[in-house]
Amino acid sequence: MRDFQADVIRAAISGKPLPEGGFSWSPARMQLFRFCQRAYFIRYYLAQGGWNIHAHPAARSAYLEKHLPAFEQFLSHTLEQSVSDALFYAVRREKKERFDIFRRALVQGLERRITALIISLEKQDYLTDPKLPGLLESFHEEEGFLHPEKVGTRCAAAFSKILPALLEEKSIREKIENLEPLSLRRSEDFLALNWRSFTVWLHAGIIWTEGEAVTSLRFHAFREQPGSILPDHGLESALFREYVRQKMHREQTLFNVFSFDGAGKTAYNTVEPGPVAADRVEVSSTGMLRMVRDNGEVCMQDFAAASDPEKCPVCPFRQTCTLLHSTEIKS
């Protein structure tokens, strides 16, 4: 009988990359490639077989680290989902009642998602399905993330500090009170752009239209930590403008970012499109595709680990990287 377990292990170790026609690019992919090529290999190749709970331990670890959000990512995504749901609900009500309805729905949405996280952490459901509520720090057993109730309290404390600033932001309040229901778009989490022979993916945020202008509102929780991966909002703004031109045939765009940290520091900015986005996509995608050997395979040894020691403690794939070193997996 064929050894399917061996097939899974081999696929997880050496990887079978997609042909260029199936290759896709995103700002996050570019940033991880620049951050550490070994981490890039772990996420985009080693994790491919990790959905199988019987896969090689390194592949399984890679799969979990790929899908589990870090604490700041969880805060960003949770706030964005809650704002989107509350906004969609409120704009269908009378204008004079919208803001109060939005505020209550927002708080309820945050509470519901924090509760779901606590329950999932308690039951450890995320260890079998990392797409369920979970945290990378809990998986890594980091101090401060071992007790689900305390994690929930930490989330609630962070949101309680930043919600007043969000609700007091004049431009956001005006949108709540004046947006027409049909101007909100909720059909997609990611935007797909046609680019040469591959697809460029961009996180959508909350999108609405006003006249000829199209706006994307994004949320970014940050922690000032040396070596961490920071988003390039200028590049994302440029790609959003290209998407609007390509798919919606409009020229006017606004790319707004509400940034915050766990201590209550907030900022609301309109980010102008960065320069030469096309060149950056072409250069970085070419670099990624060159890592594929002529026979269509990739090998771990071709992907160098980061030389900056500050990057390793904040790398989301540090557990898998340690496993690779300790087991001396060859590809």
Image (cartoon, rainbow, N blue to C red):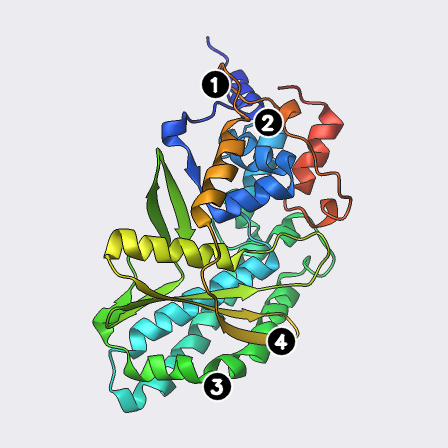
Q: Amino acid at mark 2?
A: His
Q: Secondary structure at mark 2?
A: loop
Q: Mark 1 = which residue?
A: 296
Q: How many residues crowd mark 4 within 10 Å: few (<14), some (14–19), many (20+)?
A: some
Q: Amino acid at mark 3?
A: Glu
Give the residue at x 53% y 30%.
45
* First in residue order: circle 3 vs circle 1: 3
Q: Nearer the viewer, mark 2 or mark 3?
A: 3
Q: Amino acid at mark 4?
A: Lys
- On screen, residue 305 versus residue 189, left or right, reads right
Tell me, yes or no, whether the two marked residues, 4 and 2, touch with CB atoms within 8 Å.
no
Q: Position of residue 21 (x, y in %)?
A: 36, 29
- On screen, residue 294 versus residue 214, left or right, reads right
The residue lying toward the viewer, choosing from 154 and 79, is 79
**Mark linked to residue 265:** 4
The quarter of the picture where residue 71 lies is: bottom right
* Numbered label tally: 4
Q: Secondary structure at mark 4?
A: loop
User: Could you tell me how far apart the alpha carbons at marks 4 and 2 are, in whole angstroms?
Assistant: 42 Å
- On screen, residue 143 versus residue 229, left or right, reads right
* First in residue order: circle 2 vs circle 3: 2
Q: Mark 2 = which residue?
A: 56
Q: Position of residue 187 (x, y in %)?
A: 28, 57
